[in-house]
Amino acid sequence: MKKSLLTTSLLIMFAAINAQPVYKIYAGQGYTANMYVLDPVTMDTLKFISGAGGYRMTHCPLNNKIYSTGGDANIYVVDAIADSLIAIINPSDGSNNSNELEPIVLSPDQTKLYVADESSGSLFVLNTANDSIINAVTFGNADEMENMVISPDGLTLYVVDNSNVLKINTSTLTIDSTIAVNGDAHGIEISNNGQTIYSESSLGVYVIDVSTFSVIDTITSAGYFLKLNTSNSRLIGVQESNYADITELSTGVTNTVSWSSGGGRGIISHPDNSAYYIASTGGVYKIDAATLSVVDSSDQISFQSIIIIDAAISGINNSQPDFNLLTVFPNPFQSSVTFQMDISTPDDMNISLFEITGGEVKTINSQNIQQGKKEITVDLSGLSSGIYFCKVVCRDKMQTVKIIKN
């Protein structure tokens, strides 16, 4: 007996929900060099992307692109579906010059990209809708902008600038405040809730309270490059040597993990917190999060940066299809959303809600939608602020809707 279209669609969605997400690692060489795509399970090279920069990188799921700097004057744009270089952008406008672009960060709503120049003190703002530069400013008192993070509400950039952390207002592109850190600082990280900043210093890692913008603690740990795991329970830091310090934030205990060769250049945590990946001049090393031991490595190629993305989520087409199954409002929302079904039999519909990393956070099954009822309001107050994707399947159609929780 042939399965109905509804049964087939539901089986496909069930399989997609229960299957493990497929991730890809991008490791960049920097300085106008190349990018490698790696399998995070086998550590094999999947693809080589020539001339794609890779000194610092970020991924924008909204348009399926990876943006990268190369330590030169350009921003490199890679299609995350085809894994190919599609554009090279020089943001200099004559007044604000790009000579050594390094730090790069995406706004929480994914509509803007901020790129800083280490040598000129310039900051550029790119519109991800059309990859055009929409604003630029040069800070005369910026010394050596190395790395930066952005607040969860997108209102503030925090830039580590040699011996200072700069607090930059994204609306006015002005420096609101600075805080001194000791030494030639490079590393900076911010907690998911935006309340705590971690910044490298010659004394270790400074812990900065965002509300008072003051140092409240110091962690004895490496910090040239810093990264929190996705649950914000551990801080991973590397120096330009072959070891990483992993600090349990609840206890303050720091463990050191070393690898065979190569100085650390970048760190990433797997979205499910099962592993950490270190980009180094000796390759990419995979550290088991449970045992804190090196379990695998890539080819011995020199890397400067690293990111990991969910290949399935990166493939979402956010443009409106020629049909509309679902309307979500309000969007953005504070605590609850209403799903409005634009079909006559909503009992045939299933809705799944995914985090930006690909993890499912909620499913609304067809039995929860009353026959003939075209609206359902769902309490999502327990979710963290950020971007989510609603995947709706109805008979032979599927639609994805992006929603934002403030």
Image (cartoon, rainbow, N blue to C red):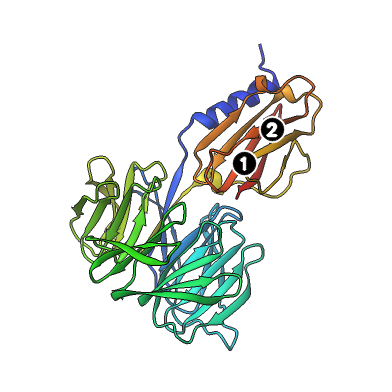
Circle 1 residues within 10 Å: few <14, some 14–19, many ≥20: some
Residue 101 at x, y percent in the picture: 46, 76
Split into 4 quadrants, where in the image is the N terminus? top right
Residue 112 at x, y percent in the picture: 59, 64
Q: Nearer the viewer, residue 314 or 157?
A: 157
Q: Nearer the viewer, residue 75 or 345?
A: 345
The residue tagged with tag 2: helix, strand or loop? strand
Residue 267 in sight in this render: no
Q: Which residue is mark 2?
A: 377
Q: Is residue 289 left or right of residue 177?
A: left
Residue 159 in sight in this render: yes
Q: CA distance from mark 1 to mark 2?
A: 11 Å
Residue at x 43% of width, y 65% of height: 212
Q: Which residue is mark 1?
A: 335
Q: Is residue 311 above or below residue 16?
A: below
Residue at x 29% of width, y 46% of height: 250
